Image (cartoon, rainbow, N blue to C red):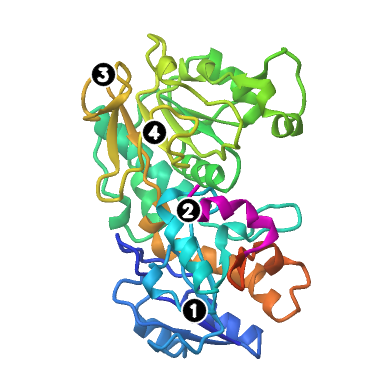
Amino acid sequence: MLFGILRERKSPPDMRAVLSPAACQQVISQFNKAEIIVEPSPIRVFPDAEYQKAGIPMGSDMEHCDVLLGVKEIPAEALIPHKKYFFFSHTIKKQPHNRQLLKTILEKKIELYDHETITDVEGIRLVAFGYYAGIVGSYNGFRAYGLKHHLFEMPKAQTLANQDALLAELKKLSLPDMKILLTGKGRVGNGARKMLLGMGVKEVGVEAYLSQNFSTAVFCQIDVLEYNKRRDGETRDMQDFFDNPQDYQSDFMRFAKVTDLYMACHFHASGAPKFFTGDDARQADFNISVVADISCDVGGPIATTLRASTIAEPLYGYDPATASETDYMSPAAIAVMAVDNLPAELPRDASEGFGATFVDHVLPAFFNGDADGILARARMTLDGRLTEKYAYLQDFVNGH
């Protein structure tokens, strides 16, 4: 079976790859029926010569590949009909800007596997860049805080070699006695937490965070039942929240009153309460001055996230009085970092981590008859039609 590593074509350019040269070598040695060809790229974080040195052939003709592997959306005109593709299509939430992409995929009878749809039997995602989003996003959060309050300046993450270099910069900081809040305990939140602990910030529990003053910087990582509460006052387990989000309301403001820097690392389910609204941000006791929305859920639970920002221009301001965008250095503004492709700032580390999980969880399915149903669950389109699991996208495809 011939796998093709695609050149990334989306603008702005993305330097990541699904498989590093070392991961390609692992695939070839582990699966004797596997072959790999790499499409040359002038921007990939792993130079063409690095693949060639690893014994992986280069070639521009992807027509003969059985499976094509990419990271970001592939331009519609570059899609090859009747092929199996893996990439982030950003269509499963009916994202309007990619409707034509999904329509073209169906017209060209492409078999699409979105990286986001690769899960185990429990629905837990198996391959993701989220951990590295947490690492870079936490770094960017501190950089934003330093700029906003004229405390310190840090180099952009994209100018540093790897996560060790990011951590080295964070360790240089002299932080005030500030409080830092993290929401979410998945891959993204744990990536951010690793950086906070690595730079020496003390972790405290919820009650201490809410009620005590500290002479040093501290952080608190909270989960859904700590920033949401049932409307009837009852206390139930987390599964009740997931099953009945409409029965809950936000309890986030008790944290907003004491937090200086907020790092949003959560997944926000449909129907769950918003964290804070524009009205909340206008309250005199709303203390957050910098929001690092690492999850970057535009139109989601965080009122200050008006749009996604970019690696080139990562910061903007939110004016609580008008609920509109402003200069983040304006005295009344809340500074917002909402870059939607954070792992692209750490392309080598992110690619190596992603590739390792792809080799472990996805590649075996091609050679064991998909024994665990990995491919069956992830397949979005087949023979010009949406598969049953993703049939809900048909009205989106039709333009409704």
Q: Residue at x 76, y 57 (%)?
A: 121
Q: Mark 2 — residue?
A: 132
Q: Earlier in the sequence, mark 4 or mark 2?
A: 2
Spatial CA distance of label 3 from label 2 is: 31 Å
Q: Mark 4 and mark 1 in contact (Cβ < 8 Å)?
A: no
Task: State which tag comes first along the sequence, 3 or 2.
Answer: 2
Splitting the image into 4 quarters, where does residue 178 fall? Answer: top left
User: Residue 277, how many percent across, how many down?
Assistant: 45, 21
What kind of secondary structure does the magenta stretch mostly adopt?
A: helix
Mark closer to the observer (3, 1): 1
In space, the residues marked 1 and 4 are separated at their CA atoms by: 38 Å
Q: Which residue is mark 3?
A: 332
User: Is 179 rendered above or below residue 53?
Assistant: above
User: Which callout, 3 or 4, points to the residue nearer the camera?
Assistant: 4
Q: Closer to us: mark 3 or mark 2?
A: 3
Q: Amino acid at mark 4?
A: Thr
Residue 388 located within the stretch drawn in magenta: yes
Q: Residue 230 in the image: x percent, y percent?
A: 69, 18
Range of residues picked out in magenta? 386-400
Q: Nearer the viewer, residue 136 or 218?
A: 136
Please name the residue that numbered disc 4 is placed on.
Answer: 305
Instruction: Tell me which numbered mark, 1 or 4, is placed earlier along the sequence.
Output: 1
Q: Are marks 3 and 1 in contact (CB under 8 Å)?
A: no
Can residue 16 be found in the magenta stretch? Answer: no
Q: Which residue is under mark 1?
A: 81
Up-down relation of residue 264 to residue 130 (above or below): above
Q: Earlier in the sequence, mark 3 or mark 4?
A: 4
Image coordinates of residue 280 in percent, x first then y, are 44, 16
Residue 143 position within the rendered picture, expressed as x and y whole percent measured from the top left:
31, 39
